[in-house]
């Protein structure tokens, strides 16, 4: 290492979390279908996930309420604990199952 080079902490590769069969467009289609994410935000999501430094969380809200988020590193969704209902828990479980599967032809 050159002593004149800046030292930066290592950052996990977030973009790798949504490549292959779980590409950003597919992921957002799942969020739309399973959790009611806004269709109009799809392009912004795809651009963000394909950027050099994508966010570590994406607030999409939808039927999960204001705290409805997608976590790219974990490939999962969540909502605020205080907003969780049995219906929302089932919705998150289903969505997370699909996201972990990675290539369902239904989306």
Image (cartoon, helix red, strand yellow):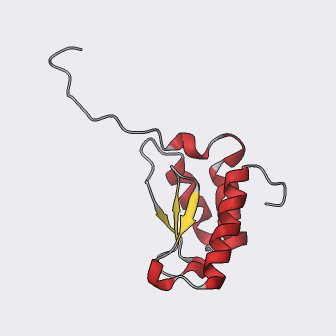
Residue 5 picture location, percent across and down = 20, 22
Say how many tags the image has: 0
Residue pictured at 66% horizontal, 47% vertical: 23
Residue 7 picture location, percent across and down = 21, 29
Residue pictured at 47% horizontal, 38% vertical: 13
Answer with the quarter of the image where residue 29 lies.
Answer: bottom right
Q: In this view, does 66 lie to the left or right of 41?
A: left
Residue pictured at 43% horizontal, 54% vertical: 55
Image quarter of the C terminus: bottom right
> Which residue ends up furthest to the front in the rendered image?
86
> Which residue ends up furthest to the left in the rendered image?
3
Q: Is residue 77 left or right of residue 87?
A: left
Residue 41 picture location, percent across and down = 57, 67
Residue 19 picture location, percent across and down = 63, 42
Residue closer to the observer: 90 or 75: 90
In this rendering, the answer to whether 93 lies above or below 52 is below
Residue closer to the observer: 53 or 100: 100
Image quarter of the N terminus: top left
In this rendering, the answer to whether 83 lies above or below 90 is below
In this rendering, the answer to whether 106 lies above or below 32 is above
In this rendering, the answer to whether 96 lies above or below 61 is above
Answer with the quarter of the image where residue 87 lies.
Answer: bottom right
Q: In this view, does 8 lie to the left or right of 105?
A: left
> Which residue ends up furthest to the right in the rendered image?
105
């Amino acid at each position: 290492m050159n002593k004149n080079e800046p030292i930066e902490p290592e950052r996990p590769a977030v973009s790798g979390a949504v490549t292959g069969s779980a590409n950003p467009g597919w992921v957002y289609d799942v969020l739309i279908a399973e959790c009611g994410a806004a269709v109009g935000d799809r392009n912004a999501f795809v651009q963000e996930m394909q950027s050099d430094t994508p966010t570590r969380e994406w607030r999409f809200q939808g039927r999960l309420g204001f705290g409805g988020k997608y976590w790219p590193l974990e490939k999962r969704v969540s909502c605020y604990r205080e907003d969780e209902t049995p219906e929302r828990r089932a919705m998150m479980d289903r969505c997370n199952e699909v996201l972990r599967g990675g290539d369902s032809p239904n989306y």
